[in-house]
Image: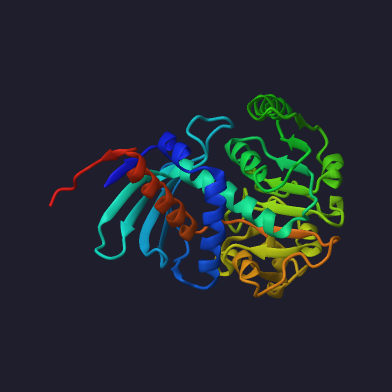
Amino acid sequence: MRILTGSDIARLLPYSRCIGAMREVMRLTSERQVVLPLRQFMNVPGTAGKLGLMPGYLAQPAAFGVKVVSKFPRPPGSHHGSHVGVVLLFDAQEGLPLALLDGGMLTAIRTASTTAMATDTLARADARSLLLIGCGEEAEHHLAALREVRAFERLQVWGRDGGRAAAFATRMSQRHGRRVEAVSSLEAAVPAADVICTVTSAATPILRGQWLVPGQHVNLVGSAIATTAEADGEVVRRSRFFVDYRDAAMAAAGELLEAMRSGIVDASHVRGEIGEVLLGRVPGREAPGDITLYKSLGVTSQDLAAAQLVHAAALEQGVGLDVELAS
């Protein structure tokens, strides 16, 4: 079994390659060439933390595995990041473990790459303005991945902490050699953006549907449980709403579930899975003035596909630590 660290994964899994892999695995997901039990959480007694388990199986190429995540409240900027955990990848023929991978870096890259793929699928081809709502680790990865699919001319970021947003903008400007601007008014920034991406830990909506304008594409990424939402019901109502995996969305897409509870929409408001759009089974953007929305929850098939890419590259390049398991 090969052990791969976060720095190994960052080197072996470029966004451009991962975006292609996410495009293919979401097709397989919508073809149901997967087994995806809904994620499970266990409260850790005496703490505010949870243990998350995400098992799954992927048919092409055949593999199964599990992601184990520790979800503990952490202050903004914590060096531990938002996802602490591991992905364990197994060979599906003999049931032997192939690799143990850092879950934080794998999740960050595959999440941003899937968002970029969905943006490439649903956003207008002439989209040139990107607004990131949130300025943490996921925002960094999303900025890099989204630039792979659109030639953005204006890059903006908003954060609830203006100082952190300004520091993020400075750091990203230096890293990418392009000006990233921190904005102080979210209400003013939203109508000017072609692509909007929420990557926050907000429990209640910060993006309002009344701010949206025709032609935009929205990615909702930060909230992954039924009781939290980054966007209000009007965002849901006004958008052509797409998800990664319908079963997961009906269990945990907080924005959609709140809009349904409020009677704003019903389950039929979900136009389809992103994989169904890629397969040509349902239309994505039908007109330039459509407001399209991709709700990302993340599914284990994405982790398995990314882990397979990393494992293959590690074997080819001799990266990682091999551990012989006891017989």
Colour treatment of the image = rainbow
What residue appears at the point 86 percent right and 47 percent down from the top-left corner?
A: 191
Q: Nearer the viewer, residue 165 or 156?
A: 156
What residue appears at the point 77 percent right and 30 percent down from the top-left corner?
A: 181
From the top left corner, tell me how far across and down residue 298 is, in percent: 54, 56
Q: How many marks?
A: 0
The answer to whether any part of residue 81 appears in the image is yes
Residue 220 sits above or below residue 15 on the image: below
Query: Left or right: 249 with respect to 5?
Result: right
Q: Quadrant of residue 42?
A: bottom left
What residue appears at the point 25 percent right and 41 percent down from the top-left corner?
A: 322
From the top left corner, tell me how far across and down residue 138 is, in percent: 59, 40
Query: Left or right: 103 with respect to 173?
Result: left
The answer to whether any part of residue 45 appears in the image is no
Q: Nearer the viewer, residue 321 or 291?
A: 321
What residue appears at the point 38 percent right and 56 percent down from the top-left corner?
A: 66
Q: Residue furthest front?
A: 316
Q: Residue furthest left?
A: 327
Residue 141 sits above or below residue 95 on the image: above
Q: Nearer the viewer, residue 264 or 153?
A: 153
Query: Left or right: 143 with respect to 108?
Result: right
Q: Nearer the viewer, residue 21 or 264?
A: 21
Residue 61 sits above or below residue 98 on the image: below
From the top left corner, tell me how far across and down residue 136 is, in percent: 61, 35
